[in-house]
């Protein structure tokens, strides 16, 4: 098992903060979480150590693009 890298740890911590605060702090923490997860996904997609890690990165990148497209469409 591989220890989580910095973007994944930061995304988790920001997500925990977002779940406990409200208003602008919630929006900021959520944005940090999404951004760092996207960085993590890109790193896994491009530099992952095996095919499974590449697929995890690809799956999250696709998921993010779909969610962003839906959010922008509304």
Image (spheres, grey):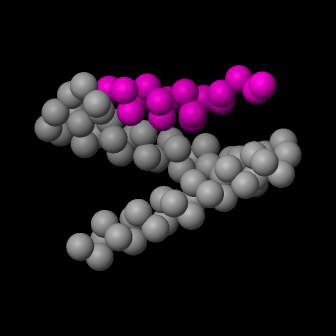
User: Is residue 15 a member of the stretch shown in magenta?
Assistant: yes
User: Is residue 65 a member of the stretch shown in magenta?
Assistant: no
Residue farthest to the left, as pictured = 23
1 displayed left or right of 62: right
Q: Position of residue 64 (x, y in %)?
A: 48, 59
Question: Which residue occupies the foreground of this view, 47 or 3?
Answer: 3
Task: Considering the whole magenta stretch, tell me its main secondary structure.
Answer: helix
Q: Position of residue 62 (x, y in %)?
A: 56, 64
Q: Relative to 36, is 51 above or below?
A: below
Q: Relative to 29, is 13 above or below?
A: above
Name the residue: 75% across, 46% down.
Answer: 53
Figure quadrant of residue 8: top right
| Quadrant housing the C terminus | bottom left
Name the residue: 57% across, 54% down.
Answer: 60
Name the residue: 71% across, 23% down.
Answer: 3
| Quadrant housing the N terminus | top right
* Residue 47 visible, this orientation: no
Figure quadrant of residue 6: top right
Residue range corresponding to the magenta coloring: 1-17
56 displayed left or right of 47: left
Counting the numbered discs, the total is 0
* Residue 69 visible, this orientation: yes
Q: Position of residue 65 (x, y in %)?
A: 49, 66
Name the residue: 50% across, 42% down.
Answer: 36
22 displayed left or right of 29: left
Q: Position of residue 66 (x, y in %)?
A: 46, 68
Residue farthest to the bottom, as pictured = 73
């Amino acid at each position: 098992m591989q220890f989580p890298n910095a973007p994944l740890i930061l995304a988790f911590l920001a997500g925990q903060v977002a779940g406990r605060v409200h208003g602008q702090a919630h929006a900021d923490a959520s944005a940090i979480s999404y951004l760092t997860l996207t960085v993590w996904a890109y790193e896994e997609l491009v530099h992952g150590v095996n095919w499974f890690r590449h697929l995890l990165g690809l799956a999250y990148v696709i998921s993010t693009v779909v969610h962003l497209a839906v959010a922008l469409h509304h």
